[in-house]
Image: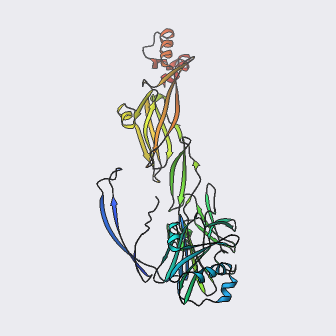
Amino acid sequence: MPSSLLLSCFAQNTNDETYKLTVQISVFSNSAMTSASSYVQSMTCRYSPWAEREILCERNYMEVSVRRGVPLIEPNFVQDDPDWSLAYPEATAADNSIWKIVFHLPANRKTTMTVARAMTNGYGINTTPTRILVRAAYNSTESQPQVIQTVPMAVLRSTTFYKQRWMVMMVDTAVTCPTDGTAFTEQMITWNVPHVLPPLVPTPQITTLDVQMGVDGRKLDPATIHSRDYKLDVSPQLITVKIPVGAVRGYYKSHVLDNTYVISYSIEPMLEHTWQDGPEKTKYTVLHPITTPFMPRPPVVTNNTVPKARVFNVTLGTFLPDVELVKIIVGPETLTVPEANLKGYNVQEHVFPNGSKTYTLQVPFEDPNVKQKVTPPDTRTYILPLTYLLNIMPENTPFTHPAVVEAILKDISKCLTYLVYNYPFLTNPVHCRGNSSCSSTCSNWLL
């Protein structure tokens, strides 16, 4: 099942090292979400040491956190870097005691915003005791799409500055995150992330300090990666993660497409790449939820009927645990599962160790909803028309699956008539066993 994620709107921050949070958890026992039981839970976590720059690519936003100090502004550095040179006039001309952000756009265009205006436009900008943070949605207005090493990326180039009467502090707050990079087969998920990200580094020459992968926000050691058949490969161009479809920590989900039963597999891998360019480190973390394309899994109706038992025995499956059988239409009659069992149809659910399930149905040949067809010279076909009505939980997505099941028997009434007219001396059909002609005609009845 998918894991839960808590995003805090307020946490007590102690020197950017210790964070405390108190949450109230409400548990509902019914779908109407009434009569909840509430629990208060406090938690504390530590995060230290921070890298000089940390970038987080989340599900629906990207964020850069940079250590803020009061370094000297070197004119040569400002002139050499195009983003900085574009921001410098805006910074020096700004009012005193104000934070602003400059977004750098293609063709040397730029947009300057106060913090208040940027936040109104959907950006998150904040300072902590030691850092400045900028957060943006992947599709924000100033974000630009770019393909790096075949991987689609969202790129936000920005410089954030603070102006005082005697000082201008400028911070490079550029951020870029992958918006795709996944490929699928029926057996394998492949996820690529560029090894070097030009929007973030002035040179393609970086020193990779560490690359780790994880799942659900937790990094994994090499032994665990190997035991789960995950793969992590680092090349000069790409960092590649491979995960088998169906691997541990992922989950399957049922869907309906054009009244056809399909499934998908989802997992949330993470990648953490720490590199150094110059004297400072960057920690780059990507959380990337992945869901495969729909995989058709049409239900199979298996006819396990033994005609001599004169009872249809039918199996329908296989389904994931989130599918439930709601009703069965037998001929013209629609029955819920309890109603079908009361009628003597014997509907059962069978759950396997992996959570998958099938449904079995038994219907007597003599049931009024069973059709019959006589086939000359001496067989009778019993026909069971079915429609299964199923539901996917918790979305309550309905779908149906029709089926027609048949069973063939030698026509007993024809055999009896044959015996009466041709072997009147027999008091029981079983006495026919000694007569080869009689036996071949009514073999099914006699066995």
Q: Is residue 382 above or below residue 230?
A: above
Query: Which of the two residues, 34 or 389, is positioned nearer the viewer here?
Result: 34
Residue at image point 51% right, 60% down: 250
Q: Quadrant of residue 102?
A: bottom right
For this view, does 231 lie left or right of residue 401?
A: right
Name the residue rendered at 69%, 81% in the picture.
Answer: 205
Question: Is 109 drawn above or below residue 404 in the view shown?
Answer: below
Percent position of residue 254, x then y:
51, 49
What colour scheme has been applied to the protein in the rendered image?
A: rainbow
At 52% from the left and 38% from the top, the residue drawn is 302
Q: Residue 27: horizontal and vertical position, in percent?
A: 33, 58
| Total numbered labels | 0
Q: Quadrant of residue 24?
A: bottom left
Residue 230 placement: quadrant = bottom right
Q: Residue 54: x percent and y percent?
A: 55, 77
Q: Nearer the viewer, residue 207 or 141?
A: 141
Instruction: Check the image and report above or below for 343 versus 443.
Output: below
Residue at x 47%, y 54% (from the top left corner) = 354
Whole-percent x and y of residue 17?
44, 82
